[in-house]
Image (tube, rainbow, N blue to C red):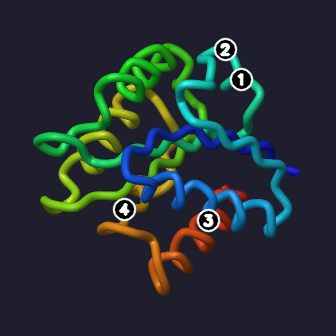
Amino acid sequence: MSRIGIIYWSGTGNTEKMSELIERGASEAGAQVSRKHVSSASPDEIGEYDVLVLGSPSMGSEVVEESEMEPFVSSVTPKLPGRKVALFGSYGWGDGEWMRNWAERMKQDGANLLDEGLIINEAPDGEKADQCVAYGAKIAAF
């Protein structure tokens, strides 16, 4: 059984909803999942997970949330080489540049990255919710 840690930041609730749906998909696929807001997460705990899943909305000029998520990501950077990592997030403008940049950064930091991340424009409803659940199952099989 795969142990998955989902750590996210959400401002409007869209990224939090994505985290819930991803958790559901991974759990239904047989994974043991721990999901928490980044404010409750510790960099020391990522060693407990087979797959680290990080979620952040696009902020400002298409960047990862800067007050809590970015410092957390920076703090786990030394622990990323060889670690399985998946990314997700929501956005309301732009074209997903923040996710492309984040994925590239994770690769440069040595992470074994699952594809290029899942991005959802606005709320993860309907078909978008199904994409999140499917992504959770994909993470469980990673």
**How far separated are the C-alphas under marks 4 and 2?**
27 Å
Please identify the quarter of the rendering in which residue 10 is found: top left
Residue 68 falls in which quadrant of the image?
top left
Q: Nearer the viewer, residue 97 or 15?
A: 15
Residues 20 and 114: in front is 20
Residue, disc 4: 119
Between the C-alphas of marks 3 and 2, the distance is: 25 Å
Mark 4 or mark 2: name the one nearer the start of the chain: 2
- Whether residues under marks 4 and 2 lie with C-beta atoms below 8 angstroms apart, the answer is no
Mark 3 or mark 4, which is nearer the start of the sequence?
A: 3
For marks 3 and 1, give the CA distance. Answer: 23 Å
Q: Quadrant of the C terminus?
A: bottom right
The residue most toward the bottom is 127
Residue 75 screen position, x and y as percent: 47, 14
Q: Are marks 1 and 4 in contact (CB under 8 Å)?
A: no
Q: Amino acid at mark 1?
A: Gly
Give the Cα separation between the discs numbered 4 and 3.
13 Å
Give me the residue at 39% from left, 69% from top. Answer: 123
Q: Earlier in the sequence, mark 3 or mark 1?
A: 3
